[in-house]
């Protein structure tokens, strides 16, 4: 039996939540599964990924093939790195140290991306404030101009 690690869709319309599951390759997307090993919510910022690491490593160890999306999720969580390091025969301590370093790098990238988006939002807010102030000054100038014409007439 060919086993795949893939996503099974749940949730409402336009509010998808996916289960990361081990399923027979011949079963349909939302059909019969062997085991649910995690959750993936792409609607949160940043996307939420909760995967049982030990079960994912088990299924990868017995030959389950991840789909492209699940492979990306496992890679971002460091599970594929851990599998490769264990396959090379490194000790558990070295593997944990490497995975810890990887997770720190991932967190740093995420924080850098978050600050970059925060800075963009702040710049947009400043631009909007400047435009509003400019429009207010234009309206004030128009108001004083109309008052001058009334006093002349």
Image (cartoon, rainbow, N blue to C red):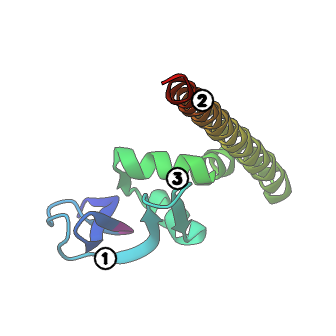
For marks 1 and 2 on the same chain, the one whose residue lies earlier in the sequence: 1
Looking at the picture, tell me which residue is in the foreground, 50 or 63.
50
Report whether 153 appears left or right of 21: right
**Residue that carries the numbered disc 1 in the rendered image:** 34
**Residue that carries the numbered disc 3 in the rendered image:** 74
In the displayed structure, 15 sits above or below 99; it is below
Instruction: Count residues near mark 3 (Cα–Cα under 10 Å), then give few for <14, some for 14-19, many for 20+.
Output: many
| SS label for mark 3 | helix
Q: Image quarter for residue 92?
A: bottom right
Task: Determine if residue 15 is in view.
Answer: yes
Q: Image quarter for residue 50?
A: bottom right
Q: Tell me how far mark 3 sits from mark 2, CA to CA.
A: 65 Å
Q: Which residues are magenta?
A: 17-21
Task: Determine if residue 83 is in view.
Answer: no
Report whether 8 appears left or right of 42: left
Q: How many marks?
A: 3
**Residue that carries the numbered disc 2 in the rendered image:** 144
Report whether 34 appears left or right of 32: right
The quarter of the image holding the N terminus is bottom left
Picture coordinates of residue 51 (x, y %)? Answer: 53, 67
* Residue found 17% across the figure and 73% down from its top: 31
For marks 1 and 3 on the same chain, the one whose residue lies earlier in the sequence: 1
């Amino acid at each position: 039996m060919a086993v795949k690690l893939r996503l099974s869709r749940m949730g409402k319309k336009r509010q998808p939540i996916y289960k990361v599951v081990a399923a027979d390759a011949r079963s349909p997307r939302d059909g019969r599964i062997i085991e649910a090993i995690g959750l993936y919510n792409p609607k949160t910022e940043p996307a939420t990924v909760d995967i049982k690491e030990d079960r994912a490593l088990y299924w990868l160890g017995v030959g389950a093939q991840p789909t492209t999306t699940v492979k990306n999720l496992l890679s971002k969580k460091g599970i594929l790195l851990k599998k490769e390091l264990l396959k090379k025969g490194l000790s558990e301590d070295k593997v944990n140290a490497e995975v810890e370093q990887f997770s720190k790098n991932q967190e740093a990238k995420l924080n850098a991306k978050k600050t970059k988006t925060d800075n963009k939002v702040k710049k947009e807010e400043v631009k909007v404030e400047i435009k509003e102030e400019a429009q207010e000054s234009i309206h004030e100038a128009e108001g004083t101009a109309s008052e001058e014409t009334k006093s002349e007439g």
